[in-house]
Amino acid sequence: MSDLLVHVTRGSIVESRHHGDIAVVNGEGKLLWSLGDPERVTYARSAAKPMQALPLVESGAADAFDMTDAEIALCCASHSGEEMHVERVSALLARLGFTDADLQCGVHAPYRSQAYEQLLRTGSPVTAIHNNCSGKHAGMLAMAKFLGADPAGYLDLNHPVQQRILAVVSELCEVPVADIAVGVDGCGVPVFGVPLARLAMAYARFARPVGVSSERAEAMSRITQAMMRYPELVAGTDRFCTTLMGAYPGHLLGKTGAEGVYCVGLVDHGVGLCVKVDDGNSRASEPSVVETLLQTGLVPADVIERLQAAHHPATKNHQGTLVGRLEPIFQLVKSSDGA
């Protein structure tokens, strides 16, 4: 059963509550701390993006197309549709011989309201480039081209690109392909369901590759370093991924996923964590991540201090008055043979 994660207070009462589950695991899959059910199966959603980018790097496709670390970070991004994102994705597509018409991620307005307002002021259309997953899809098009596969079918689970990704998820999470739940993500690509502890283990391995070949370890480290070097490309202005990785540069890998999923890899310790919020609300996943980092003691105190706005987010009314907060209230359970 899931446990209580976060209280949402207003004035003197608890107005809402968020429940969920947490797993903290090392690269060998050893459970170190947990809350609720660490074996709960959940879709990784966009937290799968580093794994989805791994075949692009380890196959040699990224090098074949002269992809920069910034572009690799964008392939792992749930970006805000800001100029720094769309310009780079557009340039990558052009270099590959594709356009935004080849992206099959669908269209939505930029997450960053200022970016959307700029489009409205200039009369520019919203296109698939502005989709938060456009970088990932550009990477999949690159992979399809490198493999000589039909780029038009890259969404299909049986396409060579998706089959390579499925194999990577199976291998990094140590879950047989037959046991991986497969659905369709918001951007149309296959999405994979595995136990939280296995998803945390994958992030532990991105933080410090173990149990993989030297070639895969090199590719994983390259993705991790790219994301940590360009956190603003992985997310955007005032986004939690940007703030988290920026609070401890070169030491934390963080990636959000829809429906209240959040994963972190801790480079110094080779540890990964995964949070899943029952009701899918990311407002609870972010303070839960910071509280988990605090309780495990895996980052210095000053890092937690820099993350205070996400740790205890303020609720303000339309006049800007502080009326409440989100407060993580759980206590992790340390495994008897754990850290």
Image (cartoon, rainbow, N blue to C red):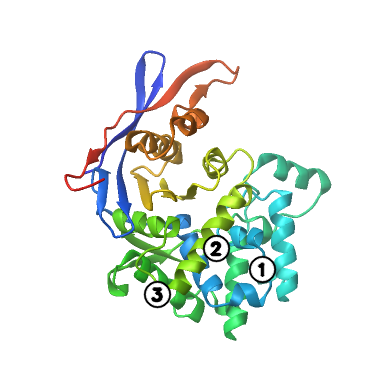
**Direction top: furthest residue:** 12
Residue shown at 69%/61% (left/top)? 89
Amino acid type of the residue that numbered disc 3 sits on in the rendered structure: Ala
Q: Earlier in the sequence, mark 2 or mark 1?
A: 1
Left or right: 208 as drawn, with respect to 71: left
Residue 205's x, y, as percent?
A: 39, 60
Q: Which residue is mark 3?
A: 167
Task: Look at mark 1 in the image and give the residue it sits on.
Answer: 67
In this view, 105 is above or below 330: below
Q: Residues within 10 Å of mark 3 (few under 14, many from 20)?
A: some
Local SS, label 3: helix
**Three-letter code, disc 1:** Met
Residue 136: image location, x then y, percent: 57, 63
Identified by mark 2, the residue type is: Arg
Specify whether 93 is left or right of 250.
right
Q: Residue furthest left?
A: 336
- Report which residue position mark 2 lands on: 222
- The residue at the point 38 percent across, 49 percent down is 269
